[in-house]
Amino acid sequence: MNILKTAAHKLSLNLSKRQLEQFEEYYQELVEWNRRMNLTSVTGHDDVLITHFLDSLTVIPELHNITADKALRIIDVGSGAGFPGIPLRIALTDIRLTLLESTMKKVRFLSHVTDKLGLDNVEIITGRAENLARDKQYRESFDIVLSRALAPLSVLVELTMPLCKIGGQVIALKKGDIREEISAANKAIVALGGESREIQPVQIEEFTDNRCLVIINKIWETPDKYPRRPGIPAKRPVS
């Protein structure tokens, strides 16, 4: 685990022995469950440490810039095998984390691995973002809404912004040349109550594929008509 420990230092993150043990246990459970279901195509030990774990942790410097009176409430939309949510919860013991995943098999894995790792303050919800954002308990209630490899930004904005509270942030983990993707999403960002703040490059040598964080500030209330019913955002992105 020295690879992860050393790389995390570049994010000003000092992982304890216990945290490194949790990451190792997470890896072992991921590989074991991956034999029975499709959780990830990346299974090599060092590859998982960098491609999944370290990539998830690149959000942390941005989270450290946020001032809050209480523990940050964070939701990982389309969590899949738990990225970026679970690595963040291992590294940041004081956050309140919600994992949202629509596939029951993956939800079972998320439930198993969070129990196995002894992670508290983690809520796991089976469902879709379009439906959860209609629940008054969750609509516009999160400080940070995260998503990684879920959808193009023009679609992702409608799935995430209704869950973000005013003054909060949506952070999308992206890679490659995303200039056209961001341009196509500008109208959706404004329509859903947001304002693009910045594209923050991930500048550590472990990544050579132009990874970045797309950060969107939530500045006003999302109109009641959003999100539209499940499936519509993907079929007809706001434009």
Image (cartoon, rainbow, N blue to C red):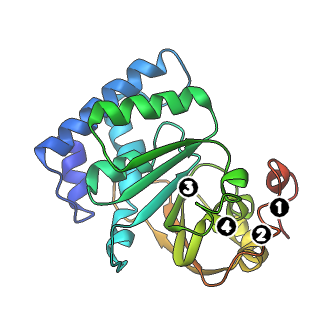
Residue at which label 4 appears: 162
Secondary structure at badge 1 equals loop
Return the disc, 4 or 3, that comes first in the chain's sequence: 3
User: Do labels 2 and 1 touch, CB within 8 Å?
Assistant: yes
Residue at the farthest top position:
36
Q: Would you identify the image quadrant in which residue 156 lies?
A: bottom right
**22 in relation to 192, above or below:** above
Viewer-proximal residue among 199 and 91: 91
Marks 3 and 2, Cα distance to the nearest angstrom?
18 Å
Residue depth check, mark 2 versus mark 4: number of the one nearer the observer:
4
Of the image marks 3 and 1, the number of the one nearer the N terminus = 3
| Residue picked out by circle 2 | 184
The local secondary structure at tag 2 comes to helix
Badge 3 crowding class, 10 Å Cα cut-off, few under 14, some 14 to 19, many 20 or more, is many
Pick the residue in front: 9 or 188: 188
Which mark's residue is nearer the viewer, 4 or 3?
A: 4
Q: Amino acid at mark 2?
A: Ala
Residue appearing at x 72%, y 67% in the figure: 180
Label 2 vs label 1: CA separation? 9 Å
Q: Residue at x 46, y 28 (%)?
A: 109
The residue tagged 1 is 237
Q: Residue lying farthest left?
A: 17
Q: Which residue is mark 3?
A: 147
Are circles 4 and 3 on residues that touch, CB within 8 Å?
Answer: no
Mark 4: few/some/many CA within 10 Å (<14, 14-19, 20+) = many
Residue 81, numbered label: none
Dot placed on the residue nearer the N-terminal end, 2 or 1: 2
Q: Amino acid at mark 3?
A: Ser
**Marks 2/4: CA distance?**
19 Å
How dense is the environment of label 1, judged by Cα within 10 Å: few (below 14), some, or many (20 and up)?
A: some
